[in-house]
Image (tube, grey):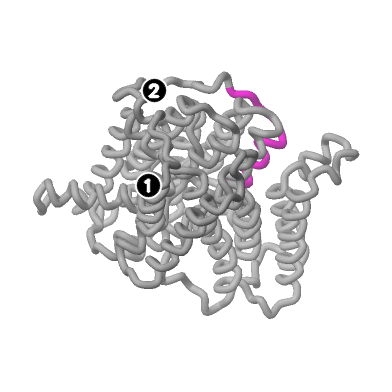
């Protein structure tokens, strides 16, 4: 254990201050935590009751995942003040798997994804060489771009809704988007960090004044519910679905590594391979438990690392409070149902900004860490992004191929990632000359 660990639980502040600091971490990640289940549940046609459960179990699992990472032992937990939440990179794959194969296959692939991370956590230090910035940046860009149509469908009022694209929906959706942009222009610090959350609240209030908010889910929800394994049925497994989620896992691991290293610098703690392996295994275990209870894949949230840097409070007791609050919120369905008050158009406006940030995160990785003057890197990016988008937009083009080949072509993320991996090894080998020599670290962690 490092010297930092000897002091992480010193309680030299008032309990109310610790509680407030923990609540601040919950607010910083809350929008990301609840929007993922809302997007996935809405896209797959979940009922109000199912969506309430999904949001509740997701909040609970965010708390459990965070506590698994904060407390360290021989095998799991990086032992640093990190907060875990839903991985945005998994949204499009989960919707695609649910639409193509069915809900049980989503959770089968999530469980397999978590098991893969747990079993191979110790080897990821070597496997990560296959995912240099030119590959990871391309994959994150593909994921973000393929999410934008989902956002615009919601902005219009929800795909298939009778009032799709009417002026009221457009006014609400673009109004929320403009509000978020203005907040990011004129606010700083914590207020800017929760601009998405504030935009959703303001947009929902405006929609309520227009008579477009339905309070039925909140009225029907209870005050307590028990956790139920396999709520949506027994998990089922499909090779394409599992491979898709394993690729998402590799991207998440690459991003988490960057967050761990950034936080290590903030804490003046030198991380070694064993520390990282414990961190990876904790994420894998959280993902597996999430699959059993029909939640989502989880990853380390970089916005909370930014909050630590801003607040200068680096102790783990604050994160323990945040994890405990998330667990408590997860047991209260009425609280989870509040998230359902958000109309589709309001959510869509916020999602344009959020998913655009996923795209910009990928572009930032490419621009800051990849030598764009090398023609080989441009070819890797062009072909992988082109393949990913092409398969997403025209999936029927490969229908005549054998099933064994369609494992790599049935999903845009899989096709794009495989293309990037293959071309990167072809052009760059495993030494990765594509990373800029001067690009040591981003001063500000990218959005998770």
Q: Residue 299 at x, y = what percent?
A: 46, 47
Q: For marks 2 and 1, give the one nearer the viewer.
A: 1
Magenta part of the chain: 235-248
Q: Main secondary structure of the magenta part?
A: helix
Residue 247 is covered by the magenta coloring: yes
Q: What is the quadrant of residue 332 in the picture? A: top left
Residue at point 83%, 41% (across, down)? 405
Which residue corresponds to mark 2?
227
The reply, left or right, for residue 316 in relation to residue 99 is left
Residue at point 54%, 57% (across, down)? 352
Label 2 vs 1, first from the N-terminus:
1
Q: Nearer the viewer, residue 437 or 389?
A: 389
Q: Nearer the viewer, residue 379 or 263?
A: 379
- As drawn, 196 above or below 248: below
- Residues packed near mark 2 inside 10 Å, few (<14), some (14 to 19) or many (20 plus): some
Q: Residue furthest right?
A: 400
Quick one: SS at disc 2? loop
- Residues packed near mark 1 inside 10 Å, few (<14), some (14 to 19) or many (20 plus): few
Q: Nearer the viewer, residue 178 or 133?
A: 178
The reply, left or right, for residue 401 in relation to residue 73 is right
| Residue 126 in view, yes or no | yes
Which residue corresponds to mark 1?
209
Q: Residue 419 at x, y = what percent?
A: 75, 56
């Amino acid at each position: 254990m490092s010297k930092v660990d000897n002091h992480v639980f010193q309680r030299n502040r008032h309990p109310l201050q610790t509680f407030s600091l923990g609540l601040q971490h919950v607010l910083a990640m809350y929008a990301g935590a609840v929007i993922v289940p809302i997007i996935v549940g809405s896209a797959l046609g979940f009922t109000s009751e199912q969506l309430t459960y999904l949001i509740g179990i997701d909040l609970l699992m965010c708390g459990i995942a965070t506590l698994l990472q904060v407390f360290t032992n021989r095998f799991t937990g990086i032992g640093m003040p990190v907060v875990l939440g839903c991985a945005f990179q998994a949204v499009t794959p989960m919707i695609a798997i649910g639409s193509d194969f069915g809900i049980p296959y989503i959770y089968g692939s999530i469980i397999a994804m978590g098991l893969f991370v747990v079993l191979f956590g110790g080897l990821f230090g070597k496997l990560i060489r296959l995912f240099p910035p030119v590959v990871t940046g391309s994959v994150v860009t593909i994921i973000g771009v393929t999410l934008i149509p989902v956002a615009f469908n919601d902005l219009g009022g929800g795909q298939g809704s009778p009032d799709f694209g009417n002026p009221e929906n457009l006014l609400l959706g673009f109004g929320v988007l403009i509000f978020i942009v203005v907040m990011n222009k004129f606010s700083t610090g914590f207020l800017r960090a929760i601009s998405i959350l504030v935009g959703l609240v303001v947009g929902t209030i405006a929609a309520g004044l227009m008579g477009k908010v339905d309070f039925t889910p909140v009225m029907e929800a209870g005050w307590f519910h028990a956790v139920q394994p396999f709520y949506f049925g027994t998990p089922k497994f499909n090779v394409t679905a599992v491979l898709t989620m394993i690729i998402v896992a590799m991207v998440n691991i690459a991003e988490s590594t960057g967050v761990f290293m950034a936080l290590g610098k903030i804490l003046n703690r030198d991380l070694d391979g064993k520390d990282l392996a414990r961190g990876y295994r904790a994420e894998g275990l959280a993902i597996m438990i999430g699959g059993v209870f029909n939640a989502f894949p989880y990853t380390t949230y970089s916005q909370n690392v930014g909050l630590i840097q801003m607040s200068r409070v680096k102790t783990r007791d604050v994160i323990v409070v945040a994890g405990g609050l998330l667990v408590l919120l997860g047991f209260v369905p009425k609280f989870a149902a509040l998230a359902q008050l958000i109309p589709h158009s309001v959510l869509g406006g916020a999602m344009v900004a959020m998913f655009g940030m996923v795209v910009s995160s990928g572009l930032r990785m490419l621009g800051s860490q990849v030598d764009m003057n090398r023609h080989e890197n441009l070819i890797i990016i062009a072909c992988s992004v082109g393949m990913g988008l092409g398969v997403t937009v025209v999936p029927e083009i490969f229908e005549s191929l054998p099933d064994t080949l369609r494992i790599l072509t049935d999903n845009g993320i899989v096709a794009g990632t495989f293309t990037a991996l293959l071309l990167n090894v072809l052009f760059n080998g495993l030494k990765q000359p594509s990373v800029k020599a001067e690009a040591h670290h981003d001063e500000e962690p990218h959005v998770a």
